[in-house]
Amino acid sequence: MLNLLSNTESYMSFYHTVLSLNGENMHLGRASHVQVFRLPDDWAHPGITHSVRFYDGRYYRELLGAASIELESDTVVLDMGQGKVYRFVKQAARRDVNKTQA
């Protein structure tokens, strides 16, 4: 998924993890080693096209859904359906955005 997750710098970065359930946001802390993989056609279903793998500081996790990238905020969005959306916001990118707005 573009260069955001395909280079070593992005892989080793920290991300803010936010879970949205029906529009209500819950901050889950930091994640690292975020990787996005497109599922093979024989595994994919409508709404489940990608796998997002990450380390949350305790466990390596893998979530399935439809992934996209928001380039302006360096964010990986994983829509799991039924109002459940994970957002992984790259920390360095967030700091840079705050500096340019000041």
Image (spheres, grey):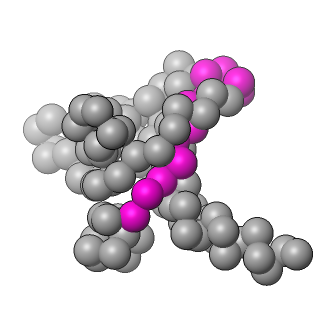
Residue visible at 63% across and 28% down in the picture = 26
Give 48 or 55, whichever is nearer the viewer: 55
Residue visible at 20% across and 45% down in the picture = 39
Q: Decide: is 11 above or below 77.
A: below
- Number of marks in the image? 0
Q: Is residue 64 visible?
A: no
Give 37 or 35, whichever is nearer the viewer: 35
Q: Residue furthest front?
A: 57
Q: Is residue 11 left or right of residue 89?
A: left
Residue 98 belongs to the span the image colors magenta: no
Q: Residue furthest right?
A: 102
Picture coordinates of residue 7, whole percent (x, y): 28, 76
Q: Please give the range of residues in magenta.
A: 13-24
Residue visible at 30% across and 45% down in the picture = 54
Q: Is residue 96 visible?
A: yes
Quadrant of the image containing the C terminus:
bottom right
